[in-house]
Image (spheres, rainbow, N blue to C red):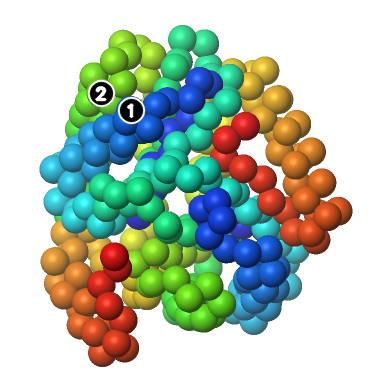
């Protein structure tokens, strides 16, 4: 988490998918302080989009901790602008919807996820936990 | 109640999917309750998922639980599911994600997913979804569809 899904009617090239995912990761990490390993992006094609929309991004992002309503507004705005630029679309052709998810509803890396803002300590604990089980870093 | 599970093409075999589904159902009854649980598996094509800036082999399992579900029970459910899942698939813990949404929020997510489509797009999507999962149910006993239409 976050999990971002991107729907389009026409398939995007592999390079465009990769570039859009990097843009999403940049914006998410820059604004929230979350590490890039948290960010998941899934692309889906073949969908007839709402009138005027070419690309629809839905994001499920953690709420609570050091995040407030202003951050989600800035995240929405920045995501909108960066994705439109990366996909070479007009802003009006991109639809962004963010939905908050309580961090304590999520397990990743074998552990309950941390509150936003407490990622650094969590990553250390998680890596130590994996090491204690003899689990190597993911390739 | 519903569960949506995202997996990668060719990553998890059909027999593993069947085992995972049986395990999820057992754990749901043990930790959450006897509610009917509809589980839909959604397969992503290769090079269509990115985690940590790289093409990914991750799976994401989301499940609805009753609104206001007890937090300790939610944690125990997710923890048991995580452990059982990885025993069956052998996946690295960094390649798995489990979320137990309150039902209302889960429905909000599903509604949000549909809202980006045109009215015809919603109908076509739901029609195709129903066709695919019915066919999959007949052939394999589990409901499998694909992200790409």
Q: Choose between A136 and B68: the one closer to the eye.
A: A136
Residue at position x 71%, y 57% in the image: B38
Percent coordinates x, y for residue A130 in the rendering: 28, 81
Residue at position x 57%, y 31% in the image: B114
Q: Is residue A29 left or right of residue B58?
A: left
| First reached walking from the N terminus: tag 1 or tag 2 | 1
Q: Residue B149 falls in which quadrant of the image?
A: top right
Q: What is the chain letter for disc 2?
A: A
Q: Is residue A52 left or right of residue A114?
A: right
* Residue A99 visible, this orientation: no
**Residue wearing tag 2:** A86
Spatial distance from mark 1 to mark 2, Cα to Cα? 8 Å
Residue at position x 23%, y 34% in the image: A23
Callout 2: few (<14), some (14-19), or many (20+) C-alpha neighbours within 10 Å?
Answer: some
Percent coordinates x, y for residue B28 in the rendering: 63, 73
Q: Looking at this rendering, what residue extends furthest in the right direction?
A: B138
Do labels 1 and 2 touch, CB within 8 Å?
Answer: yes
Q: Choose between A100 and A55: the one closer to the eye.
A: A55
Q: Is residue B63 left or right of residue B39?
A: left
**Residue wearing tag 1:** A16
- Quadrant of the rendering where the N terminus of chain B is positioned: bottom right
Q: Is residue B44 above or below residue A115?
A: above
- SS assignment at label 2: helix
Q: Is residue A86 above or below residue B42?
A: above
Q: Is residue B65 above or below residue A11?
A: below
Q: Residue A56 falls in which quadrant of the image?
A: top left
Q: Which mark is residue A67?
A: none
Q: Choose between B120 and A16: the one closer to the eye.
A: A16
Percent coordinates x, y for residue A91 in the rendering: 30, 14
Percent coordinates x, y for residue A57 in the rendering: 40, 31
Tell me the mark number nearer the camera, choosing from 1 and 2.
1
């Amino acid at each position: 988490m976050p999990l971002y899904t991107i729907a389009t009617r026409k398939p995007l090239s592999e390079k465009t998918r990769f570039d859009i995912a990097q843009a999403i990761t940049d914006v998410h990490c820059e604004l929230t302080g979350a590490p890039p390993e948290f960010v998941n992006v899934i692309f889906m094609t073949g969908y007839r989009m709402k009138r005027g929309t070419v690309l629809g991004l839905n994001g499920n992002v953690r709420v609570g901790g050091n995040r407030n309503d202003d951050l989600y507004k800035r995240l929405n705005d920045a995501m909108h602008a960066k994705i439109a630029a990366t996909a070479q679309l007009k802003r009006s052709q991109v639809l962004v919807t963010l939905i908050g998810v309580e961090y304590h509803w999520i397990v990743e890396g074998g552990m309950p996820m941390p509150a936003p803002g407490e990622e650094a300590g969590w990553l250390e604990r998680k890596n130590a936990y994996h090491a204690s089980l003899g689990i190597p870093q993911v390739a | 109640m519903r569960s949506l599970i995202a997996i990668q093409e060719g990553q998890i075999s059909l027999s593993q999917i069947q085992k995972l589904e049986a395990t999820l159902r057992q754990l749901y009854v043990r930790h959450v309750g006897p509610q009917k649980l509809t589980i839909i598996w959604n397969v992503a094509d290769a090079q269509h998922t990115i985690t940590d800036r790289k093409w990914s082999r991750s799976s994401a399992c989301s499940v609805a639980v009753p609104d206001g579900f007890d937090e300790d029970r939610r944690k125990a459910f997710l923890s048991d599911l995580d452990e059982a899942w990885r025993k069956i698939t052998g996946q690295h813990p960094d390649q798995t994600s489990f979320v137990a949404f309150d039902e209302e929020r889960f429905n909000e997510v599903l509604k949000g997913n549909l809202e980006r489509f045109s009215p015809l797009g919603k109908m076509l999507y739901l029609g195709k979804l129903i066709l695919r999962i019915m066919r999959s149910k007949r052939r394999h006993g589990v409901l499998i569809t694909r992200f790409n239409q």
